[in-house]
Amino acid sequence: MAEFTKNEMQFLKNQEICRLATSSKNVPHVVPVCYILSNNFFYIATDYGTKKYKNILENKKVALVIDTYFPRHAVLIEGKAEILERGEEYRKVYGLFYKKFSWVRKDPWKEGEAPILKINVLKKISWNLD
């Protein structure tokens, strides 16, 4: 697991949106998503019918980009996804989503209704976050 510097961690904690890249049969798919960073794992809520969910069932390798245009800062993550559907970790992470995002509070869900992707960071590269 890659470790983040203090500046990288501060940047990542202050952002809400990243781009998630998945692939199926060597065809890339990139979507903007909201994320939670907790204990050096990225968590992304999704739905069962999404292309990203289906792609991860086939290929666990993913990439994330978290960036800002001005000032120009970015972190690129390469990692491996795991799907959480129930259990203590799921409930804890769901609570973090519920607390942080109004869209979750407006349309809450229960265990088994929507999976959460857990991204294990294998490699990271950052720009202008020395």
Image: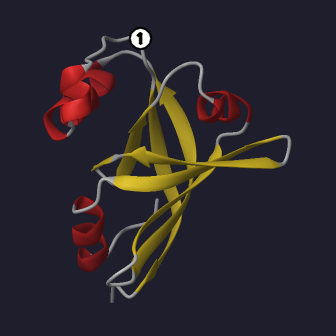
Question: Is disc 1 surrounded by few (<14), some (14 to 19) or many (20+) residues within 10 Å?
Answer: few
Q: Is residue 41 left or right of residue 80?
A: left
Residue 65 higher or lower than 73, as above or below: above
Figure quadrant of residue 93:
top left
Kindly identify the residue that appears in the image at 38 percent across and 88 percent down. Answer: 128
Residue 38 higher or lower than 72, as above or below: above
Q: Could you say whether the residue bearing mark 1 is in a helix, strand or loop? A: loop
Residue 71 higher or lower than 46, as above or below: below
Q: Is residue 98 or residue 123 the one in the foreground? A: 98
Q: Is residue 2 left or right of residue 88?
A: right
Look at the image and tell me in which quarter the C terminus lies.
Answer: bottom left
Kindly identify the residue that appears in the image at 35 percent across and 46 percent down. Answer: 35
Name, please, the residue furthest toward the right. Answer: 25
Kindly identify the residue that appears in the image at 18 percent across and 25 percent down. Answer: 105
Q: Is residue 61 or residue 46 the one in the foreground? A: 46
Way the structure is coloured: secondary structure
Q: Is residue 54 left or right of residue 19?
A: right
* Percent x, y of residue 94: 26, 27
Figure quadrant of residue 4:
bottom left
* Percent x, y of residue 17: 37, 53
* Percent x, y of residue 109: 30, 14
| Residue at image mark 1 | 113
Which amino acid type corresponds to the residue marked 1 in the rendered image? Answer: Glu
Name, please, the residue furthest toward the left. Answer: 99
* Percent x, y of residue 88: 27, 21
Q: Is residue 89 or residue 113 the one in the foreground? A: 113
In this figure, what is the number of numbered marks?
1
Kindly identify the residue that appears in the image at 14 percent across and 35 percent down. Answer: 99
